[in-house]
Amino acid sequence: MNEKSSLLMNLRLDLAESYIYGTASSENQSYAINIQAGATGLVLPKGLYKHLSSEVMFAKFTTEAGKSFQLELPVRAGRDMIEIYDDNLTLRSGWDGDMPVSVELMAMGGSA
């Protein structure tokens, strides 16, 4: 695995009552994305999971105002959408309408 494998995706997100949903788009592909509370983790579509080949990833979010924050997430393969679970609701704290507009997924460590 390449230690510097990463993928930058543009986000179009909407805030629902207890979760965040929308679309994550790269140069070649678009995926539905869902962000909610739960056991911390990242679920990627199988093709994306194989491309990034990592058991742990950093997800670095950048907001409309240019603020950034990062989560370290265990990764597993799923079906056809990106799912991010954060049991501490780190993603929702301090946003105050300043939604993320991009996420960079950065593979770290062992291969999947």
Image (tube, rainbow, N blue to C red):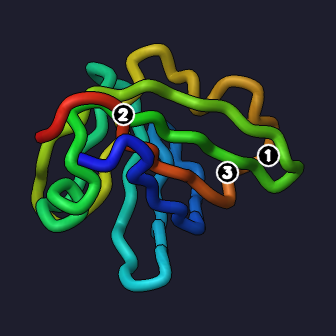
Q: Residues within 10 Å of mark 3 (few under 14, many from 20)?
A: many
97 vs 50, nearest the viewer = 50
Asked where in the image residue 48 lies, by quadrant, the reply is: bottom left
Residue 92: x, y in percent? Answer: 62, 31
- Residue at x 31%, y 55% (from the top left corner): 82
Callout 2 touching callout 1 (CB < 8 Å): no
* Label 3 to label 1: alpha-carbon separation: 9 Å
The amino acid pointed to by label 3 is Pro
Left or right for 45, reference 20: left
- Point out which mark residue 48 bears: none
40 vs 34, nearest the viewer = 40
First reached walking from the N terminus: tag 2 or tag 3: 3
Residue 64: x, y in percent? Answer: 81, 55
- Point out which mark residue 97 bears: 1
* Label 2 to label 3: alpha-carbon separation: 22 Å
* Residue at disc 2, secondary structure: strand
